[in-house]
Image (tube, rainbow, N blue to C red):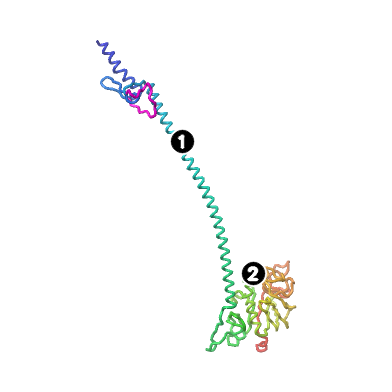
Amino acid sequence: MSRYINTYLIMCVLVPLYSCFLENPGSSPPVTATTTSYQGYDGHCTCNVNVRDVPTSSLFPSSTSSATCTPDEAMKLKLQQLEAIVNNKIQDILTDNSALKQQVAALQQQVTQVQGISSELQCARATAVSIGNDVTNLLNHVLISNSTIQQRHCIPVIMFSVNGSNTSLPRDCLEVYARNHTRPGLYEVQPDQSPVTFKAWCEDGWTVLQRHIDNSVDFASKYWDDYLMGFSDPRNSNFWLGLEHMHYISAQNNYTLRINMTGYTGKQYWAQYEDFTVDSEVNNFSLTVSNYTGNYKDGFANSTGDFETGDHGHSNCIDKTSGGWWVVRCVPFDTNLNNMIPMTSQQTRICLRWAGRCMSSSVMKIIPTSSLSYL
């Protein structure tokens, strides 16, 4: 009797339990297709496997919910499950990788487009800056031209009071002096026929045309329009009155020109012409002087000549770095009190030129000739 009982225990309890523990050590249940129950002694061992995309086979009929599987078959099922999961993951990764490649390609295309737009913007910016500079230069030119036109034609006669009564402005510095304004300085004048009033530097009845004592004002860099209306402030020592003003003053009377110069040794030089006239702009402000006296040479010998600058003239005697002057003879280093250059190619000393001699400074001024005997 005991032998039958032992055989029953072995077949019905120990063998199923042993199979279950062999499949999953640590008391894990055996693997089954769908759901399989191993009946044992006073209990049962159940292993559940959910297999995705595993085809139904004769080993695991879909209609049978209690078919048992061996450990090898359970392992095979598990491997098939894992393989299916891995294949699905690989497919997902490949799909994601393809989408990522498409996004990278689209981003690269956008980067290329952005680079092209950036290059176009830089080019457009450079063009805009260039156009802005051109517009600024044009506006400045228009303003300068407009200012010149206003000075020539649009400024009304300015009146001022002398001895309590209104009267017209003095015609030159001699009239300023005659009205008891004897201190040297700037005074408002208006010659006959002049459409504008202007300030002149007056000294004891003399109207100063030019003062050039150092390089603080670069006469050589000035052009036709500068010399036309004058430049610099006489209170700053160096200045040029303006060819237009010289013309209107000299046209109303007979004037004497006086030029005072200082040599580099300190010696004082002077030249004087009792007849001085500057013609109109139509005739290029041509200079006429005569009746020379002085203590050196006549720098205006053969004295008829047009005024020229680097941007205005026909004789090519004045280049763009020489400043403006009356061209009498095309003789290098002869006379030009508006430009300081080396006397010869061997000399480094910078000087004004008068009849070939180097001068360190010059002052040009005029006064009516008839008044000389009274001063």
Of residues 311 and 373, the one nearer the viewer is: 311
Task: Write the start and end of the magenta stretch as one range.
Answer: 47-64
Mark linked to residue 221:
2
Give how far across and how far down residue 314 sits, in percent.
Answer: 71, 71
Of residues 95 and 180, the one nearer the viewer is: 95
Within 10 Å of disc 2 (Cα), the crowding (few <14, some 14-19, many 20+) is: some
* Amino acid type assigned to the residue bearing label 2 in the image: Ser
Residue beneath disc 1: 94
In which quadrant will I find the C terminus?
bottom right
Is 366 above or below relative to 134?
below
Quadrant assignment, res 340: bottom right
Q: CA distance from mark 1 to mark 2?
A: 76 Å
Of residues 80 and 217, the one nearer the viewer is: 80
In which quadrant will I find the N terminus?
top left
Magenta span includes 55: yes
* Amino acid type assigned to the residue bearing label 1 in the image: Leu
Quadrant assignment, res 206: bottom right
Is 375 above or below relative to 49?
below
